[in-house]
Image (cartoon, rainbow, N blue to C red):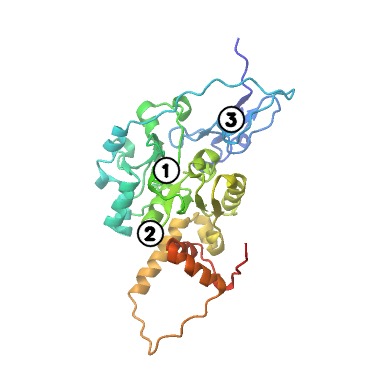
Amino acid sequence: MNAPHRFILEPYNGRSTRHTCPGCGKPHEFTQYVDTETGELLPEHVGKCNRADACGYHYPPRDYFRDNGTRPSGSDGIQGKPEPPPRPPYLHDRAEVRALRAYPERNTLSAYWRERIGADRWGEVAKAYALGTWNDGRLAGAAVYWQVDTHGHVKAGKIMQYDPSTGKRSKEERTTSWVHFMRTRQSAGELNVEQCLFGEHLLKGWPIDQPVAVVESEKTAMIAAALMPSFLWVAVGSMGAFTLAKLQALTGRKVLAFPDLSRDGSAFTKWRERAIELGHLFASIHVSDILERKATEADRNDGLDIGDHLLRSDDRTVKSSTTTITTLSAPPPPILSRAEVAVKRMAQRNPAINSLVSLLDLDLSRAQVRPL
């Protein structure tokens, strides 16, 4: 007779036992795992979304303990028996990726952003990130965000429908799914789907000493890549996916993280705390507060992201470039602070430094240079 599982999904006992999903953000749709020996719930991101078709988020206890390098102890303090080796992860065929890249003109995401950003610039980004297009059924024309790891394994494909007139997610119901579910009607848990960073395959050709920027959504990564190509932009897929399982591919790299705005600032706080926990993995990691510092109440309510910030900056650049300002004499050269002089010298060796200073909105005139 099989022994009962120690960790189970929390039994339904009213709406209070169903929580907001960290993957899709829907309230009262997420079921957490509970430890049957202690009666305590596991952390708030360890659980399963009830919307298997529309979301598919599932982070089981096995993955949680693996990602955090721990194992549950028995009620008597003795380590439990080792779990059997995990099943091989589900992988997509690369031919499927090629097939779904065959209809870029039908893509509802590209329909807007080609016009907004420029056809050539958007086309280069869409090719680099292997953007696909779902071609049948209720999601026909939806964007397919392929997750390809550094070894070239196609681990997952998220399907997301957009409004081609706004470039934003469609407001209709059931506009998000996964390629594995649409093909097999099986969940990620049943198939053993293991996700990775969106854009992870681009790390193979990116210098180890150049910065990598991490954002929440795949669309944000693509917009930012088009507007600021001096960084490599990758996406974790959701606010709750800023985890070791996703970020371990960035080991040894210089990482900049840009969480989306949230009404109470919780997204920034959680990413900063996780960055501290995982900081030993990276050459450096910084969670930017530029959105927190510049946000209006409307921005927070709308959940703006770094892509929106870059688009605003891009608009201002375009507008200012069309205005001619004539001066009678050139202004005197500015007096630079020690920090500005130091950064100027570093930028001569690595021009990306200037982009970093601009993106983070750093005021170097008041900065101090401290000896090591």
Residue 155: horizontal and vertical position, in percent? Answer: 41, 34
Q: Distance between the residues labelled 1 and 2?
A: 19 Å
Question: Does any portion of residue 108 appear in the rendered image?
Answer: no
Q: Mark 2 points at which residue?
A: 227
Q: Name the residue under label 3.
A: 61
Query: Which residue is found at the position 52% from the left and 38% from the top?
Result: 245
Q: Distance between the residues labelled 2 and 3?
A: 39 Å
What kind of residue is marked 3? Pro
Q: Name the residue under label 1.
A: 200
Residue 32: horizontal and vertical position, in percent? Answer: 59, 33
Q: How crowded is mark 1: few (under 14 residues within 10 Å), some or many (20 or more)?
A: many
| Sooner in the amino-acid sequence: mark 1 or mark 2 | 1
Q: How many labels does the image show?
A: 3
Q: How far apart are marks 3 and 1 (CA)?
A: 25 Å
| Sooner in the amino-acid sequence: mark 3 or mark 1 | 3
Of residues 246 and 264, the one drawn nearer to the viewer in this rendering: 246
Query: Which residue is found at the position 61% from the left and 38% from the top?
Result: 44
Q: Which residue lies furthest to the bottom in this view?
A: 328
